[in-house]
Amino acid sequence: MQKLRRIDIIRILMEYVKDELIICNIGCPCKELCCVKDRAENFYMLGSMGLCSSIGLGLALSTDKKVISIDGDGSVLMNLGSLSTIGHEKPDNFILLIVDNSAYGSTGNQPTHTNNTNLCKIAQACGIDAVEVSDEKELREAIKKSLNENKTKVIVAKAIPYNEKTENIKIHPIVIKDRFMKAVKN
């Protein structure tokens, strides 16, 4: 069984995405998403570590469109309270995809604490339907199922620490915001 990398998880997700709105965690995940499939429905967070899941929740509460937040284990650990809030609100159009590589990927792959902290169990304890996946088949099944359900879902995708060599995002932050806001309204 080949271990997944974050770039693999993003590529697989984007095979299934149509018009869903995506909020992507800071740094390397944003650059990887932009490299895999840039589109107006992607919001690249260029700052605000720890807030991707909260921003995604807020967006899901304000639209009928399906919203997917791509977050990292380090960011979720930084703002664990977001899982409790997500579990309390439970919009029927929100998927939180946590890429758990047990590392702070964008700052040099320093280890996080998910070697002994189970984010899937924490999400479940917050009342969220959550699943942990560790291979491509499980990930594909979880994504397909979640996209077809009308409920809040957390997918914790286990991965190895790895940063794909990608260019910086060349789209100005104001352009990212403006085109995303138009995509939300359409």
Image (tube, rainbow, N blue to C red):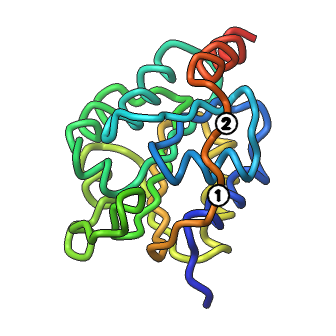
Task: Tell me where residue 8 appears, x and y as whole percent.
Answer: 65, 67
From what the image shows, is residue 177 above or below residue 55? above
Give the answer, above or below, for where 85 lies relative to 146: above
Q: For the point 67% across and 30% down, which residue is it?
A: 171
Q: Nearer the viewer, residue 60 or 11?
A: 11
Quadrant of the drawing holding the C terminus: top right
The location of residue 7, given as percent across then percent down, is 62, 63
Crowd rating for badge 1 (residues with CA inside 10 Å; few <14, some 14–19, many 20+)? some
Q: Is residue 114 left or right of residue 72?
A: left
* x and y percentages locating residue 74 in the rendered image: 30, 56
Q: Residue at x 28, y 29 (%)?
A: 88
Give the residue type at disc 1.
Thr
Dot 2 corresponds to which residue?
Answer: 170
Q: Is residue 40 left or right of residue 101?
A: right
Residue 128 disc label: none
Q: Position of residue 48 (x, y in %)?
A: 34, 33
Residue indicated by mark 1: 166
Viewer-closest of 75 and 110: 110
Label tally: 2
Q: Quadrant of residue 43?
A: top right
How far is the residue under mark 1 from the one under mark 2? 11 Å
Placement of 111 over or under 17, stated as above or below: below
Q: Secondary structure at mark 1?
A: loop
